[in-house]
Image (cartoon, rainbow, N blue to C red):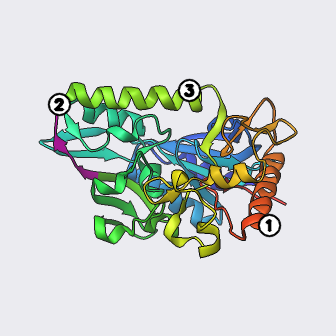
Amino acid sequence: MPIADEAQARLAEIEDLQLVPHAPLARYTRFAIGGDADLYAETGSVDAFIAALAAAKEAGIETVVIGDGTNLIASDDGFRGLVLRYRGDRISAGGTAVSAEAGAALQALVDFANQRGLRGLETLAGIPGSVGAAIYGNAGAYGHSISERVEQVRFFDGATVRCFRNAQCGFLYRESVFKSNKVWIIFSAELKLESADADSLRKISADIVKARNEKFPVTMKCAGSIFKNLLWKDLPAEVAAEVPESAVREGKVPAAWFLEQVGAKGAQRGEIHVATYHANLIYNAGSGTARDLRTLIGELKRRVRERFGIDLEEEVQYVGRFD
């Protein structure tokens, strides 16, 4: 149901909240796919964000919270309701402790730490998206995840602002308690790093960014890897026996290995393509649609399920309704 004029007017009265009616979600996703949302709103104020959530709830408006949109697939039909984004992006440090707001770019946080000779985030260089999204999905690369450095997370649970220590965050491989409780909204995090040589840290990150950009060019309309890698220890014995030792990296089997075995490279539907050089990279080659993207993802999952009897799980999140 479209947002009533009186409900939109109430949202417009919230100080520090910027509203965009009939906002094309393609503008807010790296896939550059998605129809219009009835209303898009963003703010860097915690108070304004909470007020917007409360106003939407009282008016019965369906609401979804997004980050930088680097890991989103938005429906071609858009979203009937409010799309809300927290933009607070301040980063500060005191000794080896770093505080970052959820709306800050993860790369900005990596650069901030590297510049100050603070070790612990350098291998996360080049991962697109915000700090909040990185904690939400426990982003990581090269054998390390952001959870290793998180001391405390400040979030809104729908009723009050709370703080969780690391052990309370339920971090697992690409998982957290926040991902399991999608109404919980991360506002900031405290991280504990270590002193190190700044030049060495910058070199590590620069090399990683160079490698990432060769695989996932910044101009490519994609979300990086579509599927999560699989923990080797969790695979059925008969499947694990098929995986060559050379394919197991840090206890994980790349989803790309399974996809390669079922001929995923180069597959396409409409203008949605699987890269010919990376079976876990799906991109929008032009004016692709969410329907074709979701259909191709489903086809790849079906092939792997029929061949290996396992289910690949998407890293991407969906916004809006899909057939």
Residue type, label 2? Asp
Question: What residue is shown with label 2?
Answer: 197
How many numbered marks appear? 3
Position above or below: 260 against 92:
below
Q: Quote the CA–CA distance across marks 3 and 1.
A: 32 Å
View extreme (right): residue: 270
Q: Residues within 10 Å of mark 3 (few under 14, many from 20)?
A: few
Q: Residues within 10 Å of mark 2 (few under 14, many from 20)?
A: few
Q: Quadrant of the C terminus?
A: bottom right
Of marks 3 and 1, which one's residue comes earlier in the chain?
3
- Circle 1 SS class: helix
- Circle 2 SS class: loop
Q: Which mark is residue 214?
A: 3
Residue type, label 3? Glu
Say if the magenta span includes residue 9. Answer: no
Q: Nearer the viewer, residue 119 or 240?
A: 240
Q: Which residues are magenta?
A: 190-197
Nearer mark to the viewer, of 1 and 2: 1
Nearer mark to the viewer, of 3 and 1: 1
Q: Residue at x 78, y 58 (%)?
A: 298
Say if the magenta span includes residue 196. Answer: yes
CB within 8 Å, label 1 to label 2:
no
Q: Which mark is residue 177?
A: none
Q: Quadrant of the N terminus?
A: bottom right
Q: Quote the CA–CA distance across marks 1 and 2.
A: 50 Å
